[in-house]
Amino acid sequence: MVVIEKILSFLEDPRYPSVGPHIRLLSLTGLWHPDLKSPKSRFKIIIFLVTVAFFLSQYVKCIIKFNTDDLKLILQYAPSHMGIIKTCLFQKDYKIWEELIDFISSVELKQISRKDENLDKVMKAYIRRNRRVSYFFWALAFFSNFSIFTEPYQKNNFNVNGTSTYLYIFDGYTPFSREPNGYYFSMCIQTMLGHIVSAYVIAWDTLVVSIMIFFAGQLKITRLYCTRMITANNEESHRNIAECHRFHTSLVKYQKTFNCLISSVMFVYLVVISVNLGVCIKQIAEIEDDLPTLVSSCVFLMACLIQLLLFYWHSNEVTIESDLVSYSTFQSNWAQSNKNIQKEVALLALTTRKKLVFRAGPFNVMSLSTFVSILRASYSFYTLLKGTN
């Protein structure tokens, strides 16, 4: 327990109250590199480029010499391949991500400096939830990786007549034979690069979820600001109303920025996960008398479902919280203020009616109803695959 507490305390960063552990993980993987002159940062970027090249080689091999087994392998581990898309787009929009994270930390540090008991209560609640979700997902990803990277060894076939089948995790290019001992060197490289991609996926996914939790928590704080904005002093009330409007406007602005950063990735992920779930369900249905493979496949399927649910659940919460901000303006003592202040309160209620939604592409709203639709689409794809046998 003492070791775990030390690790958890190491992950925290006082400069980033909400996203501290995620910045630590991004720094470890090399995705967060404020100092490009550092030898460590450059080495991690080289590792990133090697990993991207390895995964791209798998697609090139599949195109040049098409093989249904290679295509099935890509589809089976498609969520891992998404790590390449996520990290490439993260590097492309690095400055925007940096600006967004600086905004998050500046808002939280300013609120902490006020030493307001009510604000601290809300902030501690959503940060605590952030940690629970993130650490749970990290642990789930660890066990899922263990099942993924041991599965090929369990499925290798050794026949009496001398012919053997050796399976891969990712069939990217490696300068080794497909037979032992070259097979084990190839698997070692695939396992290392697979863990690196997994770290990319975990870092990106939990960062996105933590930012969604941040927006939901800050909308609760906005409601708190609105309920306390009217005082006995009209000038102070006017300033409070203006501050509420400014703060809500800044949240809307950065929520739009954040939505632009993740929308295209979420659309690709929506398509990939729908196909991948159908493939996984089909494989699980075909497993007979192979308990280890069944367990590993179920763990992987559960991890994919939880990963998807985390996005859509917390996106849905941001939308719900944004709907409640406008109502909170009338929970203040507006009725006891003068007409000018009452007009400002009514205007604030109108301007805070903006519904904040996250989209996966231009058409799909990230909500729980969309999550259910994805499950239906995955089942439809499974029945299609089953019907083609």
Image (tube, rainbow, N blue to C red):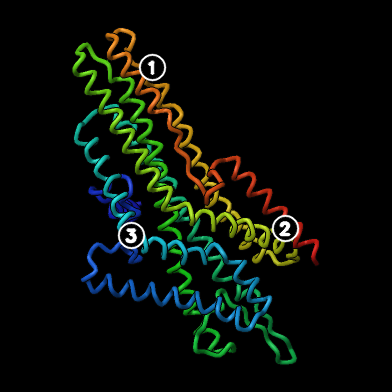
The residue tagged 2 is 382
Kind of residue at badge 3: Tyr
Q: Quadrant of the C terminus?
A: bottom right
The location of residue 248, given as percent across then percent down, is: 33, 33
Circle 1 sits in a helix, a strand or a loop, which is it? Answer: helix
Mark 2 or mark 1: whose residue is earlier in sequence: 1
Kind of residue at badge 2: Tyr
Task: Tell me the tag on residue 94.
Answer: 3
Residues at circles 2 and 1 in contact by the CB criterion of under 8 Å: no
Mark 2 or mark 3: whose residue is earlier in sequence: 3
Residues at circles 2 and 3 in contact by the CB criterion of under 8 Å: no
Place residue 132 in its image quadrant.
top left
Measured in 3D between alpha carbons, the distance from the residue under mark 2 to the one under mark 3, in whole angstroms, is 37 Å
Crowding near the residue tagged with mark 3, few <14, some 14–19, many ≥20 C-alpha atoms within 10 Å: some
Nearest to the observer: residue 329 or residue 20: 329
Task: Tell me the tag on residue 330.
Answer: 1
Circle 3 sits in a helix, a strand or a loop, which is it? Answer: helix
